[in-house]
Image (spheres, rainbow, N blue to C red):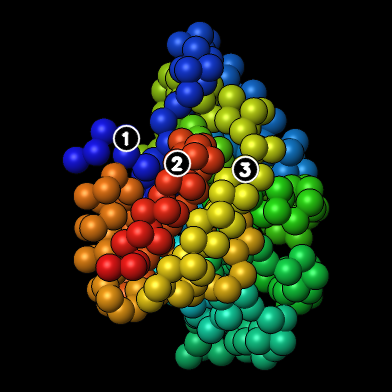
Amino acid sequence: MPENIIDLRSDTVTRPTDQMRTAIAQAEVGDDVFGDDPLVKRLQSRTAEMLGKEAAIFMPSGTMTNQIAIRIHCKPGDEFLCENACHIYNFEQGAAAQLSGVVARTLPGRNGLLEPKQFEGLVRREDIHQVRTRLVCLENTHNYGGGRVLPYDDVAEICRWAHENHLKTHLDGARLFNAVVASGIDASRWCEHFDTVSVCFSKGLGAPVGSALAGTREMIEEARRHRKAFGGGMRQAGIIAAGALFALENHVDRLKNDHENAQILSESIRRSNGLTLTHEQVDTNIVFFQVGQPWSDAKKLVTALAERGVWMAASKPHIVRAVTHLDVSDSDVAAAGKILEELSIH
Ligand SMILES: *Cc1c(COP(=O)(O)O)cnc(C)c1O
């Protein structure tokens, strides 16, 4: 095995930097279930401020923030609308059904993008036979859409439609800051269309743990109750909030670098025999590509790459995903691209 591993499996694999570790080591802490942890409180108010919301609450994972958003907007027997390939529907084990008795109605997207007109007529009438339509969930950037940034005007229009129809809106913004940096549109402008927004500190921002849910003060108070019931009440959580706060204050603007590296990687894929970008447009830090001859099988290519010290993920039998992040340097990405091109010759 090569010594220097270039790990492009996900932007969750980042480790805290030395400066972040110092911030963590110096964290003042208290019992956050009693509301005593100063860093958790500072992180929450800073997050709310950046997202333009009244309040925010710190949680252990993005899955928990999304699922608690669903819990506060819906009752058992309700329905939410979302895109076919979104995280909430596909990668959270159907938790909305398991934990909240809520069903999803999925709409087919193009690279994760939905058009406002697809929503027309989707609100069910009040009828004893039917579930009640309550919520729209969008994802930005869209992970399985290839890290695409949703078109801003479509987001605004879909949310306007939702509110006109008395539905709530939730944004899965696990990678919202990638969308902010790529679009030049401020986080609060993206968030003004949504009742609740979740963001992850442990993706591209590079913190070891944590996500936050933001919304009105009332919604976040409700979320605090549910967080306790879901087992997410944490005690001296300032230890991890310190990493998240450091990430929020220092690692947003540098996401631009990850996006440039994703472009460099996609250029290598364009030059490689038998590899085709699944999404011709790469907006942010996620690159999906289809594996044709001579490898044909994604796992085989991933194994060959791993033998050369490059880790990518086979996300489907013929599809590989590579994600750039804080822990891969420009030269790592250039090296990974070169290895990919070399392998594609044989
Ligand atoms: C990573 C991610 C989440 C949260 O996942 P966790 O595993 O709970 O951290 C939510 N939504 C999207 C789009 C994600 O990529």
In the rendered structure, which disc, 3 or 1, sits on the residue that comes first in sequence?
1
Q: How many marks?
A: 3
Query: CB under 8 Å between callouts 3 and 1?
Result: no
How busy is the neighbourhood of tag 1: few (under 14 within 10 Å), some, or many (20 plus)?
few
> Residue at image x 43%, y 46%?
335
- Decide if ligand 1 comes within 8 Å of the CB at mark 2: no
In the rendered structure, which disc, 3 or 2, sits on the residue that comes first in sequence?
3
Give the alpha-carbon distance from disc 3 to disc 2, as whole Å: 13 Å
Q: Along the horizontal axis of the image, is 229 left or right of 118?
A: left
> Residue at image x 50%, y 87%?
130
> What amino acid is labelled 3 in the image?
Asn
Q: Is residue 17 above or below residue 174?
A: above
Q: Which residue is mark 1?
A: 4
Which structural element holds mark 3?
A: helix
> Where, by quadrant of the figure, is residue 228 drawn?
top left
Which structural element holds mark 1?
A: loop
Q: Nearer the viewer, residue 153 or 258?
A: 258
> Residue at image x 46%, y 36%?
327
Look at the image and tell me whether residue 66 can be seen: yes
Q: Which mark is nearer the camera, 3 or 2?
A: 2
> Where, by quadrant of the figure, is residue 7 drawn?
top left
> What amino acid is labelled 2 in the image?
Asp
Give the alpha-carbon distance from disc 2 to disc 1, as whole Å: 9 Å
How busy is the neighbourhood of tag 2: few (under 14 within 10 Å), some, or many (20 plus)?
some
Task: List x then y, in percent, for residue 286.
Answer: 51, 58
Q: Which residue is mark 3?
A: 257
> What amino acid is labelled 1 in the image?
Asn
Q: Which residue is mark 2?
A: 332
Query: CB under 8 Å between callouts 2 and 1?
Result: yes
Q: Quadrant of the N terminus?
A: top left
Q: Nearer the viewer, residue 235 or 306?
A: 306
